[in-house]
Image: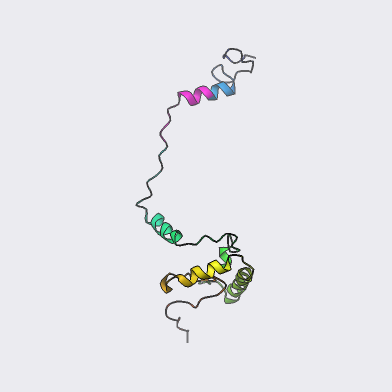
């Protein structure tokens, strides 16, 4: 068994006559490091849209909807109506006991109609926007 070639190290050597610790130190020291550069997201349209959306989002500490957005979302195109109704009833139940309900209602009331989100919001289910869907005959 050969020992690490670094003075006063009594650990068995592994690669290049060095123990694991000293090998890692030398490898990182000799390895050229590329500067860490964050990608420029200023021109990314997705980032711009998300920034605009989040800029208008209120701070609602203690909000019961946090991490439960799936309950509050509008009914999906392939989702059965009874499943969506059940989700929305759960969401409304959370809104009733939410400590942030008053702040949420003020925020929602202050939004222009075109910016109001769909789904359950501020303890209510807003009417769908746009023209009603035609019924199949």
Choose top left, top right, bottom left or bottom right for residue 87: bottom right
The percent coordinates of residue 61 (x first, y second) are 57, 59
- Which one is nearer the viewer's eye here, 103 or 4? 103
63 or 3: which is nearer to us?
63
The N terminus: image quadrant: top right
Q: Residue at x 41, y 72 (%)?
A: 114
Say whether residue 28 is left or right of residue 13. Answer: left
Instruction: Determine if residue 73 is in view.
Output: no
Residue found 40% across the figure and 56% down from its top: 46
Q: Residue 32 at what x, y percent from top left?
A: 42, 27
Check residue 34 for magenta coloring: yes
Residue positioned most to the left = 43
Q: Position of residue 124 (x, y in %)?
A: 55, 74
Q: Nearer the viewer, residue 68 or 133?
A: 68
Which residue ends up furthest to the bottom in the rendered image? 137
- Answer with the quarter of the image where residue 67 lies: bottom right
Could you tell me how many numbered marks the image carries? 0
Q: Does 79 sit above or below residue 18? A: below
Magenta range:
25-35
């Amino acid at each position: 068994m050969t020992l690490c070639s670094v003075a006063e190290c009594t650990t068995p050597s592994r690669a290049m006559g060095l123990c694991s610790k000293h090998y890692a130190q030398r490898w990182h020291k000799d390895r050229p490091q590329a500067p860490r550069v964050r990608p420029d997201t200023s021109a990314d349209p997705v980032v711009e849209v998300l920034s605009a959306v989040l800029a208008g989002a209120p701070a609602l500490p203690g909000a019961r909807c946090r991490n439960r957005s799936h309950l509050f979302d509008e009914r999906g195109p392939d989702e059965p109506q009874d499943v969506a109704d059940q989700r929305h009833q759960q969401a409304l139940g959370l809104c009733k006991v939410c400590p942030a309900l008053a702040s949420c209602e003020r925020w929602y009331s202050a939004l222009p109609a075109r910016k109001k989100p769909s789904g359950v919001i501020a303890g209510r289910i807003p009417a769908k926007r746009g023209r009603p869907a035609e019924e199949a005959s």
